[in-house]
Amino acid sequence: MEDTLKALYDAVMEGQRDIARESVVKALADGVAPGEILDAMIGAMGEVGRLFEEGEYFVPEMLIAARAMKTGMDILKPELVDADIQPAGKIVAGTVKGDLHDIGKNLVCMMLEGAGFQVVDLGSDVSPEAFVNAVNEHHPDFIAMSALLTTTMPNMQTTIEALKAAGVRDQVKVLIGGAPITDAYAEKIGADGYAPDASRAVKLAKALV
């Protein structure tokens, strides 16, 4: 059992999707609890985040690790549901209206899933109304918004105002990120937090959950 979980941990760390999938299948066949399998993958993604912050891993390494984890999660998810294992929290994510950039947002979503969060990804060019509708439909703990263009940054504030107008702003924490975004901007528009990269987005969500 420990060998299988170690193989899974290493496969996620090294971005080996096929081995990650096989390891999850074998662990389940061997009767390993779904929660233990999830913990192995969360541990691996935590280490990936640490290595990224220390400059030993870069975005490509993070992406392939996250994809390997996602491959394993696709098999594990039904088992987690059956075992009634609760996610760390629920997050609705999207790139704001007018902005079609999604690589950073996709990486944040994958890293958050790797940390045990349930993620509802709305994609890019997401209107304030779509964020409001998603809050009403999914009842998330967080909204995570990204913008890569200075011209689309104001749509973060517009979305927060739309959440207020709909009476749901106090139901969610709002996290923002993207190349032009700063802590000062987050404070100015009334967001709950800002993260400069995917690894720190996970830390921020964990701290606020």
Image (cartoon, helix red, strand yellow):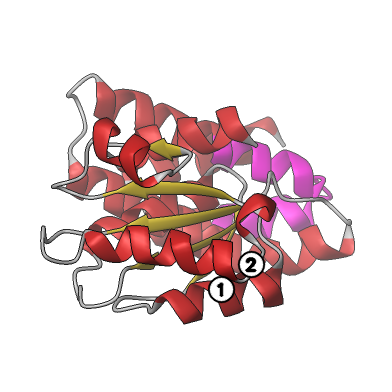
Structural crowding at the residue carrying mark 1, measured as other residues with C-alpha within 10 Å and reported as few (<14), some (14–19) or many (≥20): many
Location of residue 143 with respect to 36 vertically, above or below: below
Q: In this rendered view, identify the residue nearer to me: 25 or 140.
A: 140
**Magenta segment:** 22-42
- Image spot of residue 98 (x, y percent): 21, 78
Tag nearer the camera, 2 or 1: 1
Q: Which residue is mark 2?
A: 75
| SS assignment at label 1 | helix
Task: Assign the N terminus to one quadrant of the image.
Answer: top right
Taken as a whole, is the magenta stretch helix, strand or loop?
helix
> Which of these two is toward me, 21 or 195?
195
Above/below status of 203 relative to 112: above
- The answer to whether the residue labelled 2 contacts the one labelled 1, judged by CB atoms less than 8 Å apart, is no
182 or 41: which is nearer to us? Answer: 182
Residue at far top of view: 54
Residue 197 lies left or right of residue 1; in this view the side is: left
Instruction: Give coordinates of residue 16: x percent, y percent.
Output: 36, 53
